[in-house]
Image (cartoon, rainbow, N blue to C red):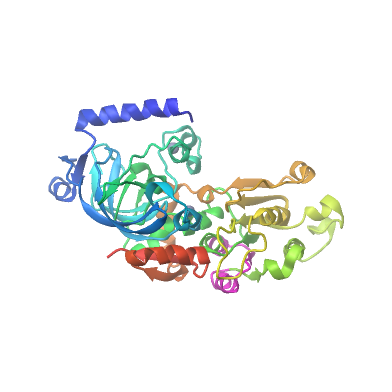
């Protein structure tokens, strides 16, 4: 998407908003209560509101007193209830380099809507909302072509130099504060565009629901949304952090025949077995033999070529044809040396190649982890083996369709969100939550706001 086309549509929206009452027009809770669904508008009622948040600024990350700035007519003001820091933010959040822009970290959260801009339609004051890491506008080219996991609102928002989100708050000294990816999450108040907000109608605890903004929902979607695990199929999952465990749970719920979890961290392997993995392998102990080990586990009951056997040769592409029906790579690069067992390849390149090689001919592999260095794929296997690579933006999640379903699955006890929360924190312990995420001493940590 170019800045020109985005700029035009955005200007149109703002123009329409101005006609309806200006950039700080908001519907507040008492007004909503009096008028039911009618959008009585109280201008600027939230602007200037005081709250606290974890802010990455200068060379540090700490809790700051903040004041809310005026909000866009399509933004939603949310009082945060719970947030789980994502591993992908730890490098930026814990770095000691001087940053030019103060920012509340993270890109998901959960809370209750306290005010909506004049143009907001999707949510109402009082709604409890998951703020997802992927938007769903329903109007862009990708949304219209069935790929809301690539909603252009998200990708435009993340493009360098095209950040459409103004700062949402300021510190006591007047420093303007942005929300990471336009979302943030690690502050008592969030302002998110409605495209990121998914209302959920349930009594489930906020600490569990906040996992649907990113980690658990992304991992579960890997086996349910675009790439769908088939009953009785062989599934392999690289990485048993919160995303990988979400995929393991999808294997259990979708009825996979076996779910092979692969992680160097012992407690994560043990946890994956509790969450539905049928086998857990240590990639350090297995070394380069990990691929053959997975292929062997997926060999099936017979080797007979004309009786459905998968082993039909011992050399070259014939061997590469064997493996799991579905593979999820949810390991990602290692941003910091962890306090738990380190990854065999911190760049993740080797893991991606192993995930590829563990996939059977004609099988499916989803690449979810960040790998920032080029990955050399052998041309012959790319051309000949018919493996489908699925991109792992939130596991192919369709947030408005899928998150309400995942809520039902948690309610029915099919998805276990609670067990994934290793530790709970207050906002003042927020830095520790990010540190523990970086150290990989937890599956997932949740900051609960009082
Ligand atoms: Zn994330
Ligand atoms: Zn869209």
Q: Is residue 89 left or right of residue 62?
A: right
- Report which quarter residue 63 is drawn in: bottom left
Q: Position of residue 118 (x, y in %)?
A: 23, 38
Residue found 42% across the figure and 71% down from its top: 423
Residue found 14% across the figure and 45% down from its top: 35
Span colored in magenta: 248-276
Residue found 48% across the figure and 57% down from its top: 90
Q: Nearer the viewer, residue 268 or 350?
A: 350
Q: Nearer the viewer, residue 91 or 390?
A: 91
Is 222 part of what is drawn in magenta? no
In which quadrant of the rendered image does the C terminus lie?
bottom left
Looking at the image, is 376 positioned above or below residue 95?
A: above
Q: In this view of the protein, can residue 168 be seen by the observer? A: yes
Q: Position of residue 333 (x, y in %)?
A: 59, 56
Residue found 36% across the figure and 67% down from its top: 429
Q: Nearer the viewer, residue 275 or 52?
A: 52
Q: Position of residue 378 (x, y in %)?
A: 77, 46
Q: Nearer the viewer, residue 229 or 91?
A: 91
């Amino acid at each position: 998407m170019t800045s020109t086309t985005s700029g035009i549509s955005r200007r149109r929206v703002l123009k329409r908003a101005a006609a309806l009452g200006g950039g700080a027009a908001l519907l507040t809770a008492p007004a909503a209560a009096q008028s039911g669904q009618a959008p009585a508008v109280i201008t600027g009622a939230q602007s200037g509101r005081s709250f606290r948040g974890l802010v990455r600024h200068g060379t540090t990350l700490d809790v700051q007193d903040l004041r809310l700035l005026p909000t866009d007519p399509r933004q939603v003001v949310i009082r945060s209830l719970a947030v789980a820091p994502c591993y992908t933010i730890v490098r930026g959040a814990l770095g000691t380099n001087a940053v030019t822009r103060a920012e509340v970290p993270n890109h998901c959260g959960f809370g209750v809507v306290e005010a909506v801009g004049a143009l907001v339609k999707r949510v109402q004051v009082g709604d409890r909302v998951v703020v997802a890491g992927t938007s769903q506008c329903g109007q862009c080219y990708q949304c219209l072509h069935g790929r809301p996991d690539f909603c252009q609102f998200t990708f435009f928002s993340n493009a360098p130099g095209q950040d459409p989100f103004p700062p949402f708050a300021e510190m006591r000294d007047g420093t303007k504060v942005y929300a990471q990816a336009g979302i943030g999450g690690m502050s008592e108040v969030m302002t998110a565009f409605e495209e990121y907000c998914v209302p959920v109608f349930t009594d489930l605890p906020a600490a569990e629901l906040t996992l649907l903004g990113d980690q658990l929902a992304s991992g579960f979607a890997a086996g349910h949304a675009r790439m769908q695990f088939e009953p009785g199929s062989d599934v392999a999952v690289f990485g048993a952090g919160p995303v990988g465990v979400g995929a393991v749970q999808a294997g259990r719920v979708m009825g996979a025949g076996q779910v092979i979890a692969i992680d160097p961290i012992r407690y994560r392997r043990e946890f994956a077995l509790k969450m539905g993995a049928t086998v857990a392998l240590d990639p350090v102990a297995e070394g380069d033999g990990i691929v053959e080990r997975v292929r062997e586990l997926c060999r099936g009951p017979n080797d007979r070529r004309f009786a459905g056997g998968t082993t039909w040769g011992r050399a070259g592409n014939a061997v590469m044809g064997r493996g799991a029906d579905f593979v999820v790579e949810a390991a990602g690069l290692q941003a910091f040396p962890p306090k738990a067992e380190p990854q065999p390849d911190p760049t993740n390149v080797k893991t991606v190649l192993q995930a590829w090689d563990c996939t059977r001919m004609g099988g499916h592999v989803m690449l979810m982890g960040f790998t920032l260095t080029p990955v050399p794929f052998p041309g012959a296997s790319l051309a000949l083996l018919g493996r489908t690579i699925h991109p792992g933006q939130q596991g192919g999640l369709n947030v408005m369709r899928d998150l309400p379903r995942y809520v039902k699955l948690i309610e029915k006890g099919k998805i276990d969100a609670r067990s994934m929360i290793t530790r709970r924190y207050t906002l003042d312990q927020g830095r520790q939550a990010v540190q523990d995420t970086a150290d990989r001493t937890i599956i997932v940590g949740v900051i609960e706001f009082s």
